[in-house]
Image (cartoon, rainbow, N blue to C red):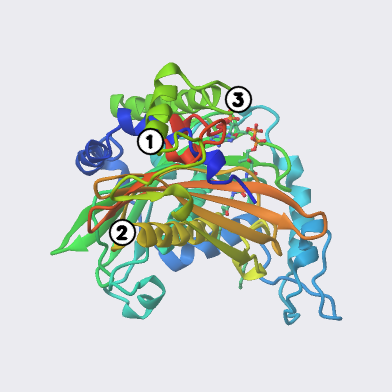
């Protein structure tokens, strides 16, 4: 099932030698908005949206169904093979069902631009949005966000960021004359989320802001920020960079998006950074361990770990000794299963990306918790790739693996795949990377196997990142 811990070892050690986690955290905590300043005039003339209205706006923009239709016999009406597994009887109502909504969306094909140049350019401020999550002023919405430590559930924040990121992209691509957008905008990548605060309070209002910061031909980079109200001021909590991709109305082929024109030197800098982010992703993809052999330095790191665990009495590949304050990598993992019910669908009748992130984050947190033995706090989220959509009705298998630890830091990789019970095939849908800081120092995680069976995620981050197939 998925990538075994043995096949995951090689790539993590390299990154940690290059990117020592504590300094990485220091950068996270001191940088501005992912290293760039907030643009001051963006907020002018913008009325904030209530968080509950973000999804209803999205539904209106794409004309999504409000009802998952079932046959009168009580079985799910299915044109997609992946619905086979779903056996969830829902009450039929007078609402538009999802099949009808998809039929209507097909007609929007004629509204797609043939060339990107045919679309009017946009400014960064055209897509700027503010959303309020009034945890302080509307206590009735707190419970959904509350965890057992009396702080805010980060998984819920991931969901809100995902919905907001998509709404920002629809704002960028909005054509005044079109009441419905012909575009299906999906989350392709969570490039980075940096936390600036360890704890988010459950009783203070939260504000999200964000705008499109770079566009390609069919993809858009979105930068978002979350702030929390303390003593009358909004203080920064996190900065996030997502990449969204526009597809045709049926979510089958890529579709062009409006160009973005930077208007000031600051905006040019932000745009340039977006361009560099894209090139960096291509570089990582080229350097993937799945395509390129490890370097001499990487081989040495792996070999050193092997030598450190060798049983000097037997000198055998099989007989290995766990060093003090360490845990075998194969003992630092947790698995989970989700049945993907219609309730978790997005506006395109696939499973909502934010839900997948919440589930993966919670498994990642539990994995870090069981390995570290004390409460972990999320520090950073990197490179969540949405490789393929998850269909409603899928069986989603999640595997959390601690791949690297240093002092109080824990790096967890969560792999998710769908299992088709009919064909018995597994397909990877997402890979998630979370960095936690634990209350106490955590044991070292040590891979056991060598000889071509290194689990990719047990090596330093630099090496581990080379396994990620970007773009
Ligand atoms: C009353 C109750 C009512 C209930 C009603 C229901 C409604 C409920 C509402 C729910 C909440 C609202 C949800 C709204 C949010 C929806 C978002 C999601 O969930 S989405 C769900 C979660 N997400 C998914 O499911 C997505 C799954 N993944 C996919 O579908 C595909 O992998 C893909 C489309 C992302 C890329 O396909 P691929 O064939 O590879 O694409 P191409 O080669 O054609 O390139 C096209 C462009 O994409 C670029 N690019 C590509 N990859 C990356 C990357 N990794 N990194 C960066 N960029 C990338 C590439 O460079 C190129 O750019 P450019 O040069 O043209 O500018």
Q: Is residue 469 above or below residue 395?
A: above
Q: Is residue 375 above or below residue 321?
A: below
Q: Which residue is mark 1?
A: 312
Q: Nearer the viewer, mark 3 or mark 1?
A: 1
Q: Earlier along the polypeptide chain: callout 2 or callout 3?
A: 3
Q: Kindly identify which numbered label has been placed on residue 117.
A: 3
Viewer-nearest residue: 39 or 32: 32
Viewer-nearest residue: 122 or 188: 188
Question: Residue at coordinates 81% horizontally, 80% vertically from top-left?
Answer: 74
Label 2 close to label 1 by CB (< 8 Å)? no
User: Can residue 157 be seen in the rendering of this structure?
Assistant: no
Q: Which residue is mark 2?
A: 376
- Judged from this view, the residue extending furthest toward the top is 296
Q: Nearer the viewer, mark 2 or mark 3?
A: 2
Question: Residue at coordinates 35% horizontally, 35% vertically from top-left?
Answer: 308
The answer to whether mark 2 is within 8 Å of ligand 1 is no
- Judged from this view, the residue extending furthest toward the front is 313
Label 2: state its secondary structure.
Answer: strand
CA gap between label 2 and label 3 equals: 48 Å
Question: Residue at coordinates 77% horizontally, 66% vertically from top-left?
Answer: 85
User: Can residue 105 be seen in the rendering of this structure?
Assistant: yes
């Amino acid at each position: 099932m998925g990538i075994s811990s043995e096949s995951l070892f090689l790539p993590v050690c390299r990154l940690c030698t290059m990117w020592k986690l504590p300094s990485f955290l220091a950068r996270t905590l001191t940088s501005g908005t992912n290293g760039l300043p907030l643009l001051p005039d963006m907020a002018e003339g913008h009325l904030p949206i209530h968080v509950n209205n973000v999804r209803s706006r999205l539904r209106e923009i794409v004309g999504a169904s409000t009802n998952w239709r079932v046959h009168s016999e009580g079985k799910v009406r299915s044109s997609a093979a992946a619905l086979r597994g779903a056996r969830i009887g829902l009450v039929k109502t007078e609402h538009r069902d999802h099949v009808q909504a998809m039929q209507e969306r097909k007609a929007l094909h004629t509204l797609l631009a043939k060339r990107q140049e045919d679309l009017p350019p946009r400014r960064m401020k055209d897509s700027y949005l503010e959303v309020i999550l009034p945890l302080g002023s509307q206590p009735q919405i707190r419970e959904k966000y509350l965890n057992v430590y009396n702080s805010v559930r980060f998984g819920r924040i991931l969901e809100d960021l995902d919905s907001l990121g998509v709404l920002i992209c629809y704002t960028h691509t909005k054509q005044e004359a079109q009441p419905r957008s012909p575009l299906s905008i999906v989350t392709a990548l969570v490039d980075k989320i940096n936390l600036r605060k360890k704890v988010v309070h459950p009783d203070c209002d939260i504000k999200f802001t964000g705008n499109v910061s770079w566009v390609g031909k069919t993809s858009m980079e979105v930068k978002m920020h979350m702030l929390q109200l303390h003593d009358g001021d909004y203080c920064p909590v996190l900065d996030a960079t997502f990449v969204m991709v526009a597809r045709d109305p049926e979510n089958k082929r890529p579709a062009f998006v409006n160009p973005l024109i930077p208007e000031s030197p600051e905006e040019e800098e932000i745009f340039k950074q977006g361009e560099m982010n894209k090139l960096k992703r291509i570089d990582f993809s080229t350097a993937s361990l799945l395509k390129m052999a490890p370097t001499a330095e990487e081989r040495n790191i792996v070999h050193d770990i092997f030598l450190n665990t060798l049983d000097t009495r037997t000198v055998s590949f099989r007989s290995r000794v766990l060093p003090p304050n360490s845990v075998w990598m194969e003992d630092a993992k947790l698995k989970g299963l989700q049945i993907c019910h219609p309730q978790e669908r997005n506006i395109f009748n696939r499973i909502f990306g934010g839900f997948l992130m919440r589930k993966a984050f919670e498994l990642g947190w539990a994995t870090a918790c069981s390995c570290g033995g004390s409460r972990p706090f999320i520090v950073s989220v990197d490179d969540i790739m949405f490789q393929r959509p998850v269909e409603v009705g899928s069986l989603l298998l999640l595997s959390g693996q601690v791949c690297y630890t240093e002092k109080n830091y824990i790096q967890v990789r969560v792999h998710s795949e769908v299992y088709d019970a009919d064909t018995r095939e597994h397909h990877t849908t997402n890979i998630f990377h979370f960095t936690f800081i634990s209350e106490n120092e955590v044991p070292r995680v040590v891979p056991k196997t060598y000889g071509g069976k290194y689990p990719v995620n047990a090596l330093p981050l630099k090496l581990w990142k080379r396994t990620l197939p970007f773009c």
